[in-house]
Image (cartoon, helix red, strand yellow):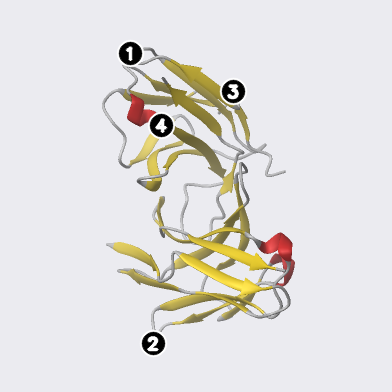
Amino acid sequence: AQSVTQLDSHVSVSEGTPVLLRCNYSSSYSPSLFWYVQHPNKGLQLLLKYTSAATLVKGINGFEAEFKKSETSFHLTKPSAHMSDAAEYFCVNTNAGKSTFGDGTTLTVKP
Amino acid sequence: DSGVTQTPKHLITATGQRVTLRCSPRSGDLSVYWYQQSLDQGLQFLIQYYNGEERAKGNILERFSAQQFPDLHSELNLSSLELGDSALYFCASTPGQGGPGNTIYFGEGSWLTVV
């Protein structure tokens, strides 16, 4: 069985400050973990993915995530938030054709 | 642009009716997935097809059915519609069967409103 828990349903940051979106996972197998972003009225766009190569994964738009097996975490970070980062973010665990989505974290960026 | 195309983008229909949502996967992708996103239940996996065959099943209601055609496009049929079926329905595709590391590419979604 696999699951994904996004620890914060809402995160609010000021523009130019760091972003941290937290994701914990559980998986019977070695996980394939993804972060997707969904802007209002849009589909889900891939930010980055972890597939057992490097534990620090760099994605688009300055985002990165670190896979920590000991903590079963895959937190998403960005050094400096931009207004355009305001969106909903989903952590996803994929195995054998089934994808388990977290409940999503809404990121608000204040000017 | 992910390369996954969904039609229609918006649909309003009455309770008890039936609708069909259409999806064209990325060129060359053999797997198609359907997801439902609603405010109260979040994003839920419905069903996956791989090269025309059902591959995995999630929380899909019996009133819903899907198929994947020889040209790899897929349709999701929703019947006896209820107010609670109002949601954003996403189609997604992957090149393979969805194993480890396969990136899932999402379409823009079809907004269904049942009135």
User: Residue sitting at 34 percent across and 20 percent down?
Assistant: B81
- Label 2: few (<14), some (14–19) or many (≥20) C-alpha neighbours in 10 Å: few
Closer to us: mark 3 or mark 2? 3
Rendered image: mark on residue B8 = 3
- Of the image marks 3 and 4, the number of the one nearer the N terminus: 3
Q: CA distance from mark 3 to mark 2?
A: 45 Å
- Of the image marks 3 and 1, the number of the one nearer the N terminus: 3
Q: CA distance from mark 4 to mark 1?
A: 28 Å
Which chain is disc 3 placed on?
B
Residue that mark 2 sits on? A70
Q: Is residue A49 visible?
A: yes
Give the vertical position of A20 relative to B62 (above or below): below
Q: Amino acid at mark 2?
A: Ser
Residue that mark 1 sits on? B16
Discs 3 and 4 lie in a common subunit: yes
Q: CA distance from mark 2 to mark 1?
A: 50 Å
Residue that mark 4 sits on? B53
Residue B16, given in percent of the width and then of the height, sits at: 33, 13
Which chain is disc 2 placed on?
A
State how many labels appear.
4
Closer to us: mark 3 or mark 4? 3
Closer to us: mark 2 or mark 1? 1
